Amino acid sequence: MNLTSGRLLYNKIVESDLSNYLSWYTHEEVMRFVMGRPFTEAEALARFDKALKTNEDYPQVGWYCVSDKKNQNFVGIAKLVFVEMGLAEVGYGMMPIHWGKKLGTEMLQTLVDYAQTIAEINELLAIVHPDNVATKKILANQNFTLISSGFEDSRPAEYYRLPISGKP
């Protein structure tokens, strides 16, 4: 399912999104706050194949290429993916040219709003690099709560959760 918000379009990732996907996952500045380092092209390609498979297997959720409504320029990547029964992971990020424009807030709000329409999702999980101060502020403003700190794929991570209102 494709989504829309005030300034953005969220289209499920398809083969033709490969160049945008690679530009995001191999960008040093972006990945510093996501994975701690940019992906190699081979790593990004493997992740792209995984995103395509997720989108195929789970039509209600998935990975999205986010673009500007006005000019269709690539803004970033967003995801809403199932982790386990009742729990979905939410994530988003944008290219540095779009930082500071409150697009992160718009992206997260869109994903939270959409998650509330999916009966199988009772709670959202966000995994954040501890140095990503901007995202931690956005999560706090959306009422996500820090539940633990640890490691995700051998990198430092903080785990935030948000119960979906009106659901058990």
Image (spheres, grey):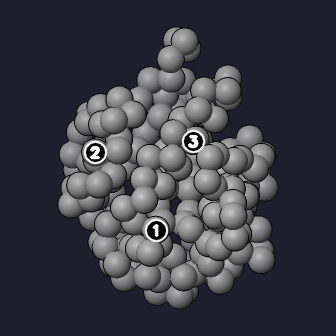
Quarter of the image holding residue 53?
bottom right
Closer to the camera in the image, 141 or 149: 141
Residue plotted at (57% across, 81% down): 22
67 to the left or right of 153: right
Q: Residue at x 54, y 35 (%)?
A: 112
Amino acid type, callout 1 = His
Mark 1 secondary-structure assignment: helix
> In the rendered image, which residue does mark 3 sit on?
111
Q: Amino acid at mark 2?
A: Lys
Left or right of 138 on screen, residue 62? right
**Label 3 is placed on what type of residue?**
Leu
Residue 20 in sight here: yes
How many neighbours does mark 1 have within 10 angstroms: few (below 14), some (14-19), or many (20 or more)? some
The residue nearer to you, when weighing 120 against 136, is 136
Q: Is residue 90 visible?
A: no
From the viewer's perspective, is 161 left or right of 83? left
User: Which mark identifies residue 121?
Assistant: none
Residues at marks 3 and 1, CA–CA distance in whole angstroms: 18 Å
Please tell me which of labels 2 and 1 falls first in the chain. Answer: 1
- Which residue is disc 2 drawn over? 137
Up the image or down, 101 lies above or below 1; here it is below
2 w.r.t. 20: above or below: above
Residue 133: quarter of image:
bottom left
Other-residue count near label 2 (Cα within 10 Å), few / some / many at <14 / 14–19 / ≥20: few
Q: Earlier in the sequence, mark 2 or mark 3?
A: 3
Residue at label 1?
98
Residue 146, position as x, y percentages in the image: 26, 36
Q: Secondary structure at mark 2?
A: helix
Q: Is there CB contact under 8 Å for labels 3 and 1?
A: no
